[in-house]
């Protein structure tokens, strides 16, 4: 398990894209966000951690977040780009082993720490190359504005910038 975590973290920090396998093919009207994948895949804490890590890694490297693709169906007949909006942290997702929660939380805390450092250093992450579809202000005190766009980018900007 520990070696698997180390390799996942190493992959996340250098990858430009990740493919997330899903046992269920999403419907045409289903929103294209990782946490909404059907069949429980979007509820999986490990899937959420990979998605969060890809976004965090892009922020820390001052790059657009890596692309997240979902493959489903026989022979991966379904392959589409997905976005990452975190309704819940990865550690709140479904995890197969009781020890996984602490391991996932450790990595999510490292990603959050890195994202905060990138925000303090850069003041921004990325802008959208299309329409912004969701905007939120972080509590407490509304220090950051977070937005998600049609381009699959999650943008974080300090309110005072």
Image (cartoon, rainbow, N blue to C red):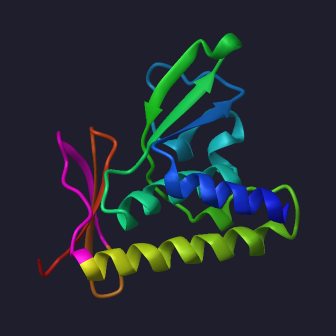
Is residue 32 one of those drawn in magenta? no
The answer to which of 136 and 101 lies nearer the viewer is 101
Q: Residue 44: x, y in percent? A: 70, 50
Q: In this view, does 124 lie to the left or right of 113?
A: left
- Residue under the point 63% across and 17% down: 76
Q: In this view, does 121 lie to the left or right of 99?
A: left
Which residue is found at the position 67% from the left and 73% from the top? 105
Residue 98 location (% of width, % of height):
88, 67
Residue at x 70% of width, y 68% of height: 104
- Residue 133 location (% of width, % of height): 25, 46
* Image quarter in which the C terminus is found: bottom left
Residue span colored magenta: 122-137
Q: For the N terminus, give its image quadrant.
A: bottom right
Residue lying furthest bottom in this view? 141
Image height check: is 71 above or below 34? above
Q: In this view, does 133 lie to the left or right of 55?
A: left
Q: Residue at x 63, y 22 (%)?
A: 72
Number of marks in the rendered image: 0
Q: In this view, does 97 lie above or below 115?
A: above
Question: x, y (%) of residue 109?
Answer: 57, 77
Q: Quadrant of residue 140?
A: bottom left
Q: Within the magenta stretch, is there residue 136?
A: yes
């Amino acid at each position: 398990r520990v070696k698997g975590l180390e390799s996942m973290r190493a992959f996340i920090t250098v990858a430009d894209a990740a493919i997330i396998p899903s046992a269920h093919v999403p419907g045409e009207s289903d929103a294209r966000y990782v946490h909404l994948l059907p069949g429980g895949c979007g509820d999986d804490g490990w899937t959420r951690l990979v998605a969060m890590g890809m976004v965090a890694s892009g922020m820390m490297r001052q790059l657009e977040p890596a692309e997240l693709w979902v493959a489903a169906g026989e022979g991966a007949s379904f392959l589409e780009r997905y976005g990452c909006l975190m309704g819940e942290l990865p550690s709140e997702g479904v995890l197969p082993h009781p020890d996984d929660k602490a391991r996932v939380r450790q990595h999510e805390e490292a990603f959050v720490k890195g994202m905060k450092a990138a925000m303090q250093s850069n003041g921004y992450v990325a802008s959208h190359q299309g329409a912004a579809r969701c905007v939120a202000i972080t509590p407490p005190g509304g220090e950051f504005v977070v937005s998600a766009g049609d381009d699959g980018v999650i943008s974080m900007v300090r309110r005072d910038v």
